[in-house]
């Protein structure tokens, strides 16, 4: 089936035009086919965008979501194309049939809207990282923020009210009108709520991020209860920019893809299984505000204090014939957060083309990156094997140990030393104790001798199919 006939029936008009627009023209498609094919069936362009080849030979960009891969292009904020399936024997892809999609994804709106059926967390659901203290910290910050100059273009929220109380949603009353609010988890009387736009109900990351990017006026509005009256904080939106942009602003050397994966992870960990609610929004706002303004006294939950804490521990693979084990390096462009990459061009621009200089080293690259990102780095000590760096973030009660082994081979990192093993031996413990009397980092590094106070990381520089050197960090344990 050709790319020009992917839709059938009497309405081949708009739908077919939309689908055709996603596919590459013949010339760039043929050029892209010369790029190496990954084991998963992908080809990557010079910007490391993921493409697939369909059965008919046409090429199209794909986006990976929690429900699989979907056709898209670089102009789409959220993918609109067909879902696809890999055919390993042909090394090509085909579109899923409607029957397959029905069985695969019974709620196709789940990524872009709130799924009411999932609203109640079952015993096996992951608890989200938020609590009443988070909301109260946000309330205190809002109360201490002076009002901005009056902007007559604001107060759009007044049009959100209804003269009758909504039956399906929680609501508050202001000036004789009833305003729907984002769901509250607690049954106690709240003093901070979020007015909900009548045409946008917060739910999943993709929909919320898209709203902040294209129409932020639809975001929920803060309403504080003061002296028994609700007052809407119209001049202070909860989110001043898309969530991914918050991450990129706070950590400007992160790759765009890593910034989005981190933003998605913060959102998911702040959410209930059915989607984001009022307390989750407070956790989001407080976390991103703290990342951007580190001097802020309002702290997010400890688990969200730093992006490196969000990295999952990679599973290990046994290595035959040796006393080592392997770590499979996750792909760069997975939607879920498994690794943090640093943008090649930004690193080179910031540090005088350091990735390409012969007089530089992996240790020097990461020392510069980490210090630029706000960490305190011990550049001189060699307490650990594999040229490891130790570093810390002010206010965070852990020490990061970043091992820098040999470059990955075919996507595999060879690991010879168990994480934490060196800390159990007297030589290292003695050296840490000695530094407590000779350096200014006494408290920082001595934390390594306490159980649970060390985060074990592995870093390196990976060469991409497009011959780019990409610094990366993963977590081991």
Image: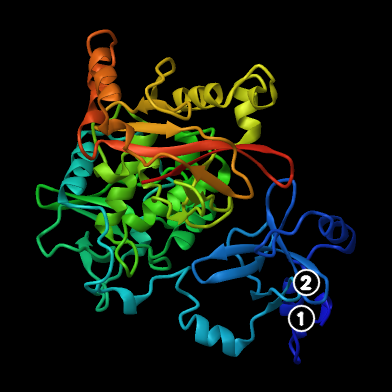
Picture coordinates of residue 373, whole percent (x, y): 45, 28
In the rendered image, the quadrant that contains the N terminus is bottom right
Q: Which mark is residue 6?
A: 1
Marks 2 and 1: in contact by CB < 8 Å?
yes
- How busy is the neighbourhood of tag 2: few (under 14 within 10 Å), some, or many (20 plus)? some
Picture coordinates of residue 68, whole percent (x, y): 55, 70
Picture coordinates of residue 108, whole percent (x, y): 50, 78
Q: Is residue 234 left or right of residue 229?
A: right
Residue drawn where x is 24% and y is 79% of the image? 167
Residue 299, placed above or below residue 68: above
Residue drawn where x is 48% and y is 26% of the image? 387
Q: CA distance from mark 1 to mark 2?
A: 8 Å
Which element is circle 2 on?
Answer: helix
| Residue corresponding to mark 2 | 20
Q: Which mark is residue 215?
A: none
Residue 379, placed above or below residue 347: above
């Amino acid at each position: 089936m050709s790319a020009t006939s992917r839709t059938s029936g009497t309405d081949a008009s708009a739908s077919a035009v939309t689908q055709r627009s996603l596919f590459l023209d013949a010339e760039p498609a043929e050029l892209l086919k010369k790029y190496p094919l990954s084991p998963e069936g992908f080809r990557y362009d010079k910007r490391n965008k993921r493409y697939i080849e369909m059965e008919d030979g046409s090429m199209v960009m794909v986006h990976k979501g929690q429900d699989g891969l979907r056709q898209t292009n670089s102009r789409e904020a959220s993918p609109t194309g067909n879902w696809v399936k890999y055919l390993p024997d042909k090394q090509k892809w085909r579109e899923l049939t409607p029957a397959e999609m029905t069985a695969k994804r019974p709620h196709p709106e789940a990524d872009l809207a709130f799924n009411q059926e999932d609203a109640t967390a079952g015993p096996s659901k992951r608890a989200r990282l938020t609590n009443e203290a988070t909301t109260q910290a946000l309330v205190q910050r809002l109360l201490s923020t002076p009002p901005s100059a009056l902007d007559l273009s604001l107060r759009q929220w007044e049009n959100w009210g209804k003269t009758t109380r909504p039956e399906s949603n929680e609501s508050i009353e202001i000036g004789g009108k009833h305003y729907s609010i984002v769901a509250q988890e607690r049954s106690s009387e709240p003093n901070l709520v979020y007015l909900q736009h009548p045409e946008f109900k917060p739910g999943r990351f993709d929909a919320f991020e898209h709203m902040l990017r294209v129409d932020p006026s639809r975001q929920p509005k803060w309403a504080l209860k003061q002296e028994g009256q609700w007052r809407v904080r119209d001049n202070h939106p909860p989110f001043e920019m898309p969530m991914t942009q918050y991450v990129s602003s706070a950590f400007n050397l992160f790759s765009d893809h890593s910034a989005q994966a981190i933003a998605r992870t913060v959102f998911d960990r702040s959410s209930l299984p059915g989607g984001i609610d009022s307390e989750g929004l407070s956790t989001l706002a407080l976390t991103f505000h703290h990342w951007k303004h580190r001097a802020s006294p309002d702290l997010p939950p400890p688990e969200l204090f730093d992006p490196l804490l969000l990295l999952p521990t990679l599973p290990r693979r046994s290595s035959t014939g040796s006393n080592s084990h392997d770590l499979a390096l996750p792909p760069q462009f997975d939607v879920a957060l498994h690794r943090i990459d640093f943008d090649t061009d930004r690193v080179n621009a910031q540090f005088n083309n350091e990735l390409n200089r012969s007089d530089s080293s992996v240790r020097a690259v990461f020392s510069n990156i980490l210090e630029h990102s706000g960490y305190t780095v011990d550049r001189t000590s060699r307490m650990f094997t594999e040229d490891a760096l130790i570093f810390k973030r002010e206010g965070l009660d852990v020490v990061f140990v970043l091992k820098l082994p040999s470059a990955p081979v075919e996507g595999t990192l060879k690991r010879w030393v168990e994480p934490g093993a060196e800390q159990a031996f007297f030589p290292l413990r003695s050296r840490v104790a000695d530094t407590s009397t000779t350096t200014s980092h006494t408290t920082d590094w001595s934390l390594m001798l306490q159980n649970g106070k060390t985060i074990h990381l592995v870093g390196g520089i990976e060469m991409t199919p497009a011959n780019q050197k990409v610094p990366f960090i993963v977590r081991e344990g």
